[in-house]
Amino acid sequence: MTTTDLTIRPFEVHVPDEDLADLRRRVAAVRWPSKELVADRSQGVQLAAIQELARCWTTDHDWRRCEARLNAVPQFKTEIDGEDIHFIHVKSPHENALPLIITHGWPGSVIELLEVVGPLTDPTAHGGSAGDAFDLVLPSLPGYGFSAEPGEVGWDPGRIARAWAELMHRLGYTRYVAQGGDQGAAVTDAMGAQAPEGLAGIHLNFLRNALGNVGGLPADSEEERTAAAAINAFRTGGFGYFLEQATRPQTIGYALLDSPVALAAWMLDHDTDSYYKISRAFLGGPTAGNLTRDHILDNITLYWLTGTGASAARSYWEGGRAAARAAGQAPAEVTLPVAFTTFPGEIFRAPRSWVEKFYPHVIYFNEAGRGGHFAAWEEPQLFSEEIRAGFRPLR
Amino acid sequence: MSTDAAAMNADPAVRPFRVDIAEEAIVDLGRRIAAWRPPEREPVDDQSQGVQLAAVQDLANYWASGYDWRGCEAKLNALPQFITSIDGLDVHFIHVRSPERNALPLIVSHGWPGSVIEQLKIIGPLTNPTGHGGSAPDAFDVVIPSLPGYGFSGKPAAPGWDPARIARAWAVLMDRLGYTRYVAQGGDWGTAITAAMGRQAPAGLAGIHVNFAQMVPPAILGHIRNGDPAPADLSDAEKRAYGQVAFATYHRGYGVIQGTRPQTIGYSLADTPVGLAAWLMDHDPGTYEHLAALFAGQPYGAITRDDWLDNTSLYWLTNTATSAARLYWQQAVTGHNFYAPADVSLPAAVTVFPEEYVHAPRSWTEQAYHNLTYFHEAGKGGHFAAWEQPQLFSEELRAAFRTLR
């Protein structure tokens, strides 16, 4: 790894007015396709939901409020391995807080994680005790948000994991833990396998290794069979975005950079549970936890304003290439302590037996009562409690 | 007449049709291309991440500054075009009768990402062979419909328009035009529709020709699905086809998206012309390389930049990319694998074009088309064979259907 500049520069978000005006102009000028021919999501994002999203985007949504939320937390940029990495860094007021680096996924960003900053860094104000405090580091993945878009190939989960270890080292942390779901789970898993000095353990809320390996996993119990069926259903009916991003990120990128509504639809169409929760939020139904219209639009707007639809999609291409290189080999072993939480609305509910199949040293396993793929975003309090419990054995 | 047939024929009127796109729509298209917000250049030097920025820039520049849709309109309006309602849907078609007597009626089905524009260059050679290196007995009357949801055909408002239903509509169309003995042809989606016609064997259909053979044995498809290496007992030609189908099965994000989420991608294709253009360029790697070279100034057989943009503009101006994508969804819900054997017993002819993304081996093709009357590997041409090599393609059709006259 070549690192020439170790400087950590403070960062604030200030988007020019003209970018916001251009966004509103484009949304207002949207040309719609004809309505889907079905009464559910089986042909994709439904016209009524996306039309309401577009209406809210041009009339109600205030990016400056999101900007203020971001600028209310300490943000920085630093160059690692040749790329500028953006991160949020909030130190706990408590002594002996455990440093924690959390990695977001796709179609997310650091915005997914803003609501866990309070509970994790300041637990006494959020139903916890001082002994549960964390110092929090929330980086933007390369190619996402305010991190730089890599100009070269190779930024796969393994390289990002090495960059995160360098980041924690640069921040002066000598003993820390790491957490992630979705793409963040791939990065966190890679950190676990690399076991950099100082990393004491990891917590995951997505069992990424099971996605491509369901045939090799136990299917004896009811919950194992249910999880296998959910993966097969995802691979049959919900895999298109994954395959397109893994093989042709540039092709889909043209639409994601040129049409805000295209970007919004593409980002809404992740998994069944989150899709219906988000579409309900726009159609006036009950909001699922913290997945509010404003929060959804904050995240989509971040992708739009930073023009990162294509570069974020590329992370799947990188992941696919890394997976192809590793094909036929056993996954790199993670001997570090692993904590895991299964959220019920996730693409599949990982059973403990599967988690233990990939991770020999499971120190914590729990199935939470609520929440889905965007667990930290949707249920920040519950998620924070899981993180506290998951890492308690490592303090 | 059964109730179904009655519904098919509720209003048998055939109305003349001319294309006349509103000026405002053309101006809006130009405005959107000019306001294009490009992504960063891909970090690779080949097409391994998809359509390359330079190719899209070349296309967008020409689309905005050198291209004229009215030229396409004039080409289309120089041909007899009609609309007729079949099975509750307006079907647009070009219908050119041969000046020769005893011409053989032929219905040609286009595919995705194509349209009737793919077929314009074969109309002359097929209907008027003596003017194009052929002889009078090789003449065809040509019917070129727009698929449901494509171009100037209606957009289905309910699910159900799969290749089998389209095939039944085509038989009604030929019947309505008064043809009692005819043949059918297609590649890409057109091959699925043409094979369905072959299986349905409507009265009058004498045989078919396809330029994409559906022929992979089910056991082989099972191996491909499992990611297995090619079985050792395959011939060299079969091994090559195995590799090609396996590649196409993985490298078909566009097909999986359109098969499972046509509405989601539809928001892109309806709102950004450059997004649409990139999507339509990215069908198969060979076609893409030709298109990238075409917009960089290299020839692509008979296909010109204007031709390609005629087709892309047609999708844009009719706002049909979403309804066109739904054909993949419709096929997916049938559970039928596109590459599975056609299982056609009528006389069938197959031409394999060398740059097609799958080269059908004769061995598998014979098992899929039970009465294979013609099998030939052409010397040049690829996925858009009729468009790229219209003369050669027309000669293939003449040779293929000669035994059925």
Image (tube, helix red, strand yellow):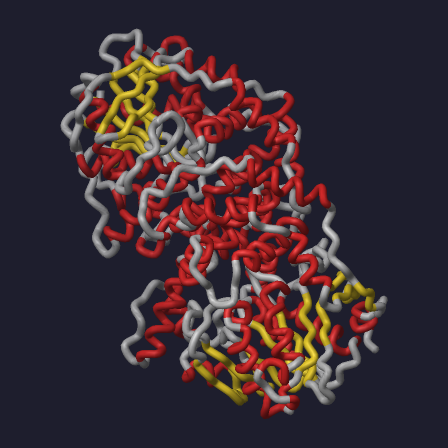
Q: Is residue B346 left or right of residue B302?
A: right
Residue B101 location, x and y as percent?
73, 88
Q: Quadrant of residue B199?
A: bottom right
Q: Point out the residue furthest to the left here.
A: A197
Q: Quadrant of residue A285?
A: top right
Closest to the observer: A372 or B262?
B262
Closest to the observer: A127 or A189?
A189
Residue A110 location, x and y as percent?
40, 25
Is there any visible trace of residue B199 in the rendered image?
no
Q: Is residue B387 left or right of residue A212?
A: right
Tell me the residue at 59%/92% (across/down).
B403
Is there any visible trace of residue A252 in the rendered image?
yes
Q: How many marks?
A: 0
Q: Is residue B367 left or right of residue B123?
A: left
Query: Relative to residue B103, is residue B15 depicted above or below?
Result: above
Residue A303 location, x and y as percent?
46, 30
